[in-house]
Amino acid sequence: MTPTPADPPPAPPDPPPAPADLVISGCTVLVHDDHEAIGFAENAAIVVRDGAVESVTPAADVRDRPAAERIDAHGQVALPGLINCHTHSPMVALRGIAEDLPVGEWFNDHIWPMEANLTAGDVALGARLACAEMILGGVTCFADHYFAMDAVAAVVADSGLRAHLGQAYFSSQGPQGRERSLEFALRHRGAAGGRITTALAPHAPYTVHDADLAATAALAREHGLPVHIHAAENREQTDTSLARHGRTPIEVLEAAGLLDTDVLLAHGTGIVERDLPVLERAAGHVAVATAPRGYLKFAWPTTTPVRALRELGVPVGLATDGAASNNSLDVWESMALTSLAQKSAEGDPRWLTSRQALHHATLQSARAVGLGGRIGSIAPGHRADIVLVDLTGPHTQPVHDLAATLVHSARAADVRTTVVDGRVLMRDRELLTIDVPATVRELGQRLPALVDRGHGTRIQEYDT
């Protein structure tokens, strides 16, 4: 008689999942589908390990998941952290100092004389106050273009934020300005545990000569560095460039080879029709940062041509510019104003929609600062840069269209919690990494010397 074979032993149970570093549960999560369309996953949870998003899952699935830290986010919306794609963070020290002026007078008679007084300590204080404002407003990454940037990098490292930093320079500084920009970029690239990326930062085509722009492009190619530059900021600059050189600012950058590099162009409200084929044939990754509040304040007649740029595949990220001109580092306001300004400029209420504005605030902004695929989406493998927004206030109720509520009704003060690289920098409106009262006291002691214009000098001349 043939023996009956024994039943195989049961398979061992699956091992329990490794403990998470952070679980955010019960929230509605902004997600992107395979076609990058905006959607919302309700009653969801975000699992974070090693600074990255491990999964976005129904909240019930992780109810018993062990975690070092948990946040109950019922009634809140989780968004990818906002990205300020162009600012000058230390300029918060000059907020409101030069109001209701044309841009030339603003620069020459006020801002550039006062910036001649800046010390590295002033830059650090301004950057610290700016980082506090951005954390409170749900900004998790910012692209900064300024002076004494070693001080800014130290503040970024301490604050826990993510930043894309460039040491600005003018041709009037001689070759040493360009060399310092390169040295800074190489020294800090990948610093703060990878939260700092760097760029070369020539100021603008009207303050940096063609030869220096070409030298910058060569350095960018040699060292694998991107470039962050003001370009075609307004229509007057474009008209002046055409009259003086027979080329637009965008054509000047092309001739210098900068459009063959990865380049972030600040503002671009002076981009004209003849610039579009130039940008389309650019060999590098070209992006534009738009900061509409400042354009309205300076009464510029045009805004960034977002629709035309988007049709070319040029990412347009959201920005505030510096608080000396914008008075605020509020990217929520930039998102709403971008949508409204585009409707006005295009004469079409269907452009920019709320969902399109959220796309620019998330994926497009991430691509603009060279971090597409790393931030800008709450998805597995992306860094855990997340903000939680409370929409229970009377100004956000009732919610008929969640995207419209986020863009046109929510405010920076509705952000409850800010997370960068899986680390909580603000919880329930409590800042955890920056002492704001101490920073304000120190800055107040420096203000009389900082705003003095009696010396009669300025760091540069605005002539365009």
Image (cartoon, grey):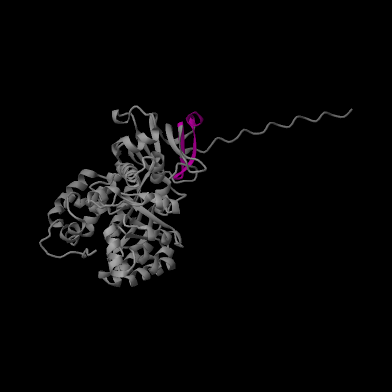
Q: Is residue 14 visible?
A: yes
Vertically, is 458 above or below 290? below
Q: Write down the quadrant of residue 4 in the picture.
A: top right
Q: Is residue 125 visible?
A: no
Q: Write down the quadrant of residue 104 in the picture.
A: bottom left
Query: On the picture, is 39 further left or further right than 188?
Result: right
Q: Quadrant of the N terminus?
A: top right
Q: Quadrant of the C terminus?
A: bottom left
Q: Residue at x 38, y 29 (%)?
A: 400
Q: Residue at x 19, y 55 (%)?
A: 102
Vertically, is 242 above or below 332? below
Vertically, is 268 above or below 170? above
Q: Main secondary structure of the magenta part?
A: strand
131, 204: nearer the viewer: 204
Q: Position of residue 385 (x, y in %)?
A: 40, 44
Query: On the picture, is 313 further left or further right than 180?
Result: right
| Magenta run includes residue 129 | no
| Furthest-front residue in this view | 347
Q: Residue at x 47, y 49 (%)?
A: 373
Q: Give the total of numbered labels.
A: 0
272, 111: nearer the viewer: 272
238, 214: nearer the viewer: 238
Q: Position of residue 101 (x, y in %)?
A: 17, 53
| Furthest-right residue in this view | 1
Q: Position of residue 436 (x, y in %)?
A: 23, 44
Task: Tell me where the magenta segment starts and ends, as one range.
Answer: 42-64
Q: Write down the quadrant of residue 111 in the picture.
A: bottom left
Q: Position of residue 444 (x, y in %)?
A: 15, 49
